[in-house]
Image: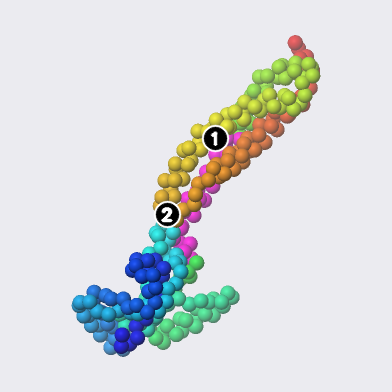
Amino acid sequence: PAFEERVVINESAARALGWEDPVGRQLWRDHHRMHNPETGEVTVKEGPVGGPVIVGVVADFHFQSLRQPIEPLAINPLAQFQRYTDGSGYLLVRIASGEVQGALGFLEEKWRELAPEQPFEFSFLDEEIERQYQTETRLLQALGLFSALAIFIACLGLFGLVSFMAEARTKEIGIRKVLGASTTHITTLLAKDFVKLVIAAHLISWPLAYFALCWWLQNFAYRIDLGSWIFLLCGGVTLVIALATVGGRAVRAALANPVEALRYE
């Protein structure tokens, strides 16, 4: 091209074009739109016209949310971009840490000189990226809060149930201790029924959790694999919490003096 139009594409664009070595090849467009930054005049020419020459290929990188796959991308120099548009767009500036306020003041001053009729608007890239996943962040916070609340309520229920069982089996525990049963044996006797309940709850909840996670991950083009270790880890943690809740009360019942339980028998 007369004005040496150049462009850099990503690997996805090279694959979409079907070119193994696209460097040096020219792209074609179905119409030609030129903008004069000085006069503001825009001219449009219909029909196939020569486009930019590919001068490089960059590795694929995410420039959108992870909900979308990486799409073909062409990167134009700023001066070239202004020839084909009305000049509007985004200017990316890397700012050193600790120099944010000074850099923003400098940029605003220069902006007022170049485009006093346009408002100076800016945003930070990390905030824009975080905003893309704001829904997921809020969902994670809500799930964490309700999960903690559910675990707390479940622990209260387990503690109340094991206390009731210990009271109901006070005489049995006293007789077993008189006959030589150890504290470990009595604690295991009281806790094993609850362990069975926790394991049964896991067997019911794991398939439901798996299908729910698979359904949620379908919103993303790139997603993790749901390995069995995730469910085993969660099951192990909940089992430890249940044993800590039940075990404390069971040990207390096992350490009680059997004489108190059998005094009036």
Determine if residue 91 is in view: yes
Foreground residue among 240 and 254: 240
Give the Cα separation between the discs numbered 1 and 2.
27 Å
Q: Mark 2 points at which residue?
A: 220
Q: In which quarter of the image is the C terminus?
A: top right
Would residue 49 be counted in the magenta stretch? no
How crowded is the residue under tag 2: few (<14 C-alpha within 10 Å), some, or many (20+)? Answer: few
Would residue 133 be counted in the magenta stretch? yes
Q: In this view, does 176 lie above or below 210?
A: above
Disc 1 or 2, which lies upstream in sequence? 1
* Element on which disc 2 rests: loop
Task: Name the kind of residue labelled 2 in the image.
Answer: Phe
Numbered circle sitting on residue 187: none
Task: Name the kind of residue labelled 1 in the image.
Answer: His
**Quarter of the figure with residue 201:** top right
- Seen at 78% across and 14% down, the residue is 263
* Element on which disc 1 rests: helix
**Residue 100 x, y percent position in the rendering:** 54, 76
Q: Name the residue under label 1.
A: 202
Q: Is residue 114 above or below residue 59?
A: below
- Spot the residue most to the top: 265
- Spot the residue most to the front: 20
Magenta range: 127-155
Determine if residue 121 is in view: no
- Seen at 75% across and 16% down, the residue is 175
**Quarter of the figure with residue 183:** top right
